[in-house]
Amino acid sequence: MGDITDHFSRKEFACNCGCGFAAIDIQIVQALEILRNKICKPIVILSGCRCPAHNAAVNGSPKSQHLCGRAADIAVKGMRKDAIAKAAEAVKIFEAGGIGKYSWGVHLDIRDTGAVRWDNRKNQKRYTNGPAVDVQPLTPELEAEIQRGIERGD
Ligand SMILES: [Zn+2]
Ligand SMILES: [Zn+2]
């Protein structure tokens, strides 16, 4: 039983550096609760809020949604990253936000600047604007864009 929603508590979203910053946006917690109930499996929060120092330490984007408590890096035991990302697409606020696949799991955020998708897994580096599930192959232009920090908008 969580203290924000049925399955999530504030402490799960606290900055991993131990600083105590845990100002997670209630909207992303509610969206994660919807996702959790869709997949019927526990969601592990790997990273929620990040203070600027910790964000820099993990090479996060200076504009990372984690800085304002609007992002969560998640993993689900026994579930493929593609399946997690696909399930997140069915949650309205994630569909309109950011969904990124990584070797460790999936980054989700509720940015309000347009939908963004990326795949940063080894040999699968792809990026696309828009909510399409099928991502475009990475072009040199997109690669440059990613290097400017979009990939780490995460
Ligand atoms: Zn911190
Ligand atoms: Zn992230």
Image (cartoon, grey):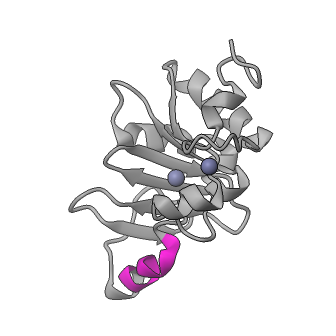
Q: Position of residue 27 (x, y in %)?
A: 77, 41
Q: Position of residue 86 (x, y in %)?
A: 46, 43
Highlighted magenta segment, given as a residue range:
143-150
Q: Is residue 3 above or below residue 141?
A: above
Residue sitting at the far top: 1
Q: Is residue 144 magenta?
A: yes
Q: Is 6 left, or right, of 131 in this rendering?
A: right
Assign the magenta stretch its main secondary structure: helix
Q: Is 120 left, or right, of 15 in this rendering?
A: left
Q: Residue at image x 69%, y 48%?
A: 93
Q: Is residue 144 above or below residue 16?
A: below
Q: Nearer the viewer, residue 32 or 16?
A: 16
Q: Nearer the viewer, residue 33 or 67?
A: 67
Q: Position of residue 45 (x, y in %)?
A: 53, 34
Q: Is residue 35 magenta?
A: no
Q: Is residue 117 visible?
A: yes
Q: Is residue 96 visible?
A: no
Q: Position of residue 39 (x, y in %)?
A: 51, 25
Q: Is residue 151 above or below residue 97?
A: below
